[in-house]
Image (cartoon, rainbow, N blue to C red):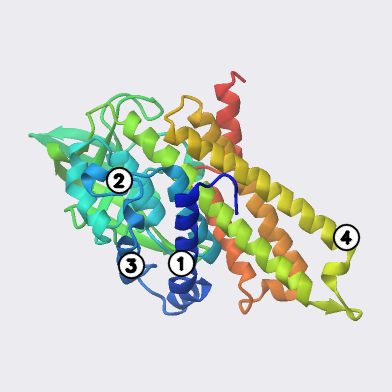
Amino acid sequence: MPLYLNDEQTMLRDTARDFVAERAPVSHMRKLRDDKDAAGFSRDLWKSFAEMGFTGILIGEDAGGLGLGHVDAGIVLEEIGRNLSPSPFLATAVAAVEALKGSAQANRWYPGILAGETVAALAIDESAKHRDSVALKAERSGNGFRLSGRKQFVTHGHVADLIIVAARTAGSTDDANGITLFAVEKGAAGLTAEAERLADSSIAARLEFDNVELTADAVIGEVDAGRDPLSRLLAAGRTGASAELLGVGGGAMDMTVSYLKERKQFGVTIGSFQALQHRAAHLYSEMEVARAAVLKAQQLLDATDDKADAAVSVAKAMTALATTLSVQEGVQMHGGIGMTDEYDIGFYMKRARVLAEMFGDANFHADKLARAAGY
């Protein structure tokens, strides 16, 4: 039993592990892919997440949630990663919930999230590699705003009930200030979505906003002051993606170690070969270091510590590197069959690749840390 989890968190881990493994194993993802499911996830499963209370982990008790923290959300995300479960949990119950906190929009959207009826998408990125720029314009129009521009890499953007959009209301594209967050409802006039299936079989969308009219009530927080809720969204999303990456890396590692104990060559199991033992031990060490980095980021976020931002970048970079090592070693140690569709290990590599890019890859966060340190 991990020493870093208290009794309640250990119970949550055990519950989440059994629930996700039973209801959303790798075979669930494989079936959605083979059926060419247009949504890319199961709405019924999302409601089951709500029935378990998972969707309310980060929502305060005063709003009907559990009032827990990022450590707890990470426990669920790790199991999602371990099983490659297609789910709106990261974008909706983690990132969107954090962005909405303290705003009037929380009252509008939290009940649906708690009930497993609302799926949120995050329209943040406009170019490759998660560059920190916002060009999509939000211009005053009567008592509201008119949105014009494009977003990409919007997971579930083609079917989401709520789309959180970062828009430019003042300044130039690369300015840190002058950003406003908006809550855009599904079916808004002038909004079109082009869905694309990614390498891991998940679906993201390119969104185009053609003079999408919104009322002033659609603003999350304050006009021109969207950097604060956007920062909360990104910190939660990056930490959550790191926890999911831990699950992907851990699942791949467990699968590989099991294979080393079963596969025989020259009459002995290949796990008895010292060279492979060394590689497995090195992988385990890298995954544990990444786990420590993720836990630190989660704890600092829960404590609203000023050092949380740096810890989040460390966690995202380290989990991307460690999980990349895990899936690469997994495929190599499985040999040629590791590249076939019949074996699940290849799916772990594909999911790791998408998650590593989401919310900024290792290079993005290394650069972010270097700039913060004055380099």
Q: Which residue is mark 3?
A: 48
60 or 322, which is in the foreground? Answer: 60
Counting other residues with Cα less than 10 Å from the Cα at mark 2, is it few (<14), some (14-19), or many (20 or more)? Answer: many
Left or right: 71, with 352 as reference point: left
Query: Residue sitting at 66 percent across and 76 percent down?
Result: 340
Number of other residues with Cα within 10 Å of mark 4, as a class: few under 14, some 14 to 19, many 20 or more: few
Q: Residue at x 35, y 71 (%)?
A: 38
Indicate which disc, 2 or 1, sits on the residue closer to the N terminus: 1
Q: Earlier in the sequence, mark 2 or mark 4?
A: 2
The answer to whether residue 370 is above or below residue 181 is above
Numbered label attached to residue 159: none
Which amino acid is tagged 2?
Ile
User: Element at badge 4?
Assistant: helix
Q: Quadrant of the N terminus?
A: bottom right
Residue on which the image places disc 4: 275
Please give the label number shown on residue 20.
1
Q: CA distance from mark 2 to mark 4?
A: 48 Å
Q: Position of residue 250 (x, y in %)?
A: 62, 58
Name the residue beneath numbered marker 2: 59
Calculate the distance from the C-alpha at mark 4 to the C-alpha at mark 3: 44 Å
